Amino acid sequence: MDTFLGAPETADDWMGTAYADDAEGAVALRRLLHDTGLIPPEHIVFGVDLWLTDDGGGKPKHKAPYVEVFVLDTTGFTNPESAVAHALKSGDLHLGHFFVELKPEEVSHFFRRCRISLVPREIFTAGA
């Protein structure tokens, strides 16, 4: 879970940020995950790690590309926003997660205008 929250891993040679727009409709990946039953109705997608290689950094091995999906249970909250606000404020994340292998063409199907910006770790951490 540390990687999703932005904490550096000891083996990372590059660090950075990523941005993407949903490609097919506003919530294509999230809708697919709900429609296929991978996510119960009371859970929301809290975040996604997109893996473009098979290594996985110590994660279970999956055929790339794949996504590691983090989900938050919103049961007992009036709306997803209040569940997220509570989880972030309290630190009580308790996120579930699972892996979904994708076909290469599905990456662009789900993530349009995907940008990943990287800098070498020594530059990112200079002066820290």
Image (spheres, rainbow, N blue to C red):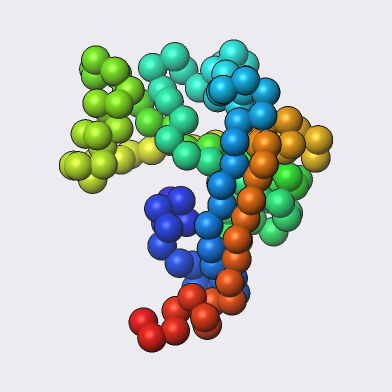
Location of residue 21 (image quadrant) = top right
Task: Quarter of the image for the C terminus: give it.
Answer: bottom left
- Residue sitting at 43 percent across and 25 percent down? 44
| Residue 50 relative to residue 70: left or right | right
Q: Position of residue 94 (x, y in %)?
A: 33, 39
> Is 32 drawn above or below residue 17 in the view shown?
above
Q: Taking the image as drawn, is residue 103 in sight?
A: no
Q: Residue at x 73, y 30 (%)?
A: 109
Looking at the picture, how far across and down is residue 75, in whole percent? 29, 18
Quadrant of the rendered structure where residue 36 is?
top right
In the picture provided, is 44 more to the left or to the right than 106? left
Direction bottom: furthest residue: 127
| Residue that extends furthest to the left in the rendered view of this protein | 90
Residue at (41, 23) in percent of width and height: 43
36 or 7: nearer the viewer: 7
x and y, in percent, of residue 114 in the image:
65, 45
Residue 3, relative to residue 91: is it above or below? below
Question: Where is 1 relative to 123, above or below?
Answer: above
Residue 101: x, y in percent? 70, 37
Q: Is residue 45 left or right of residue 51?
A: left
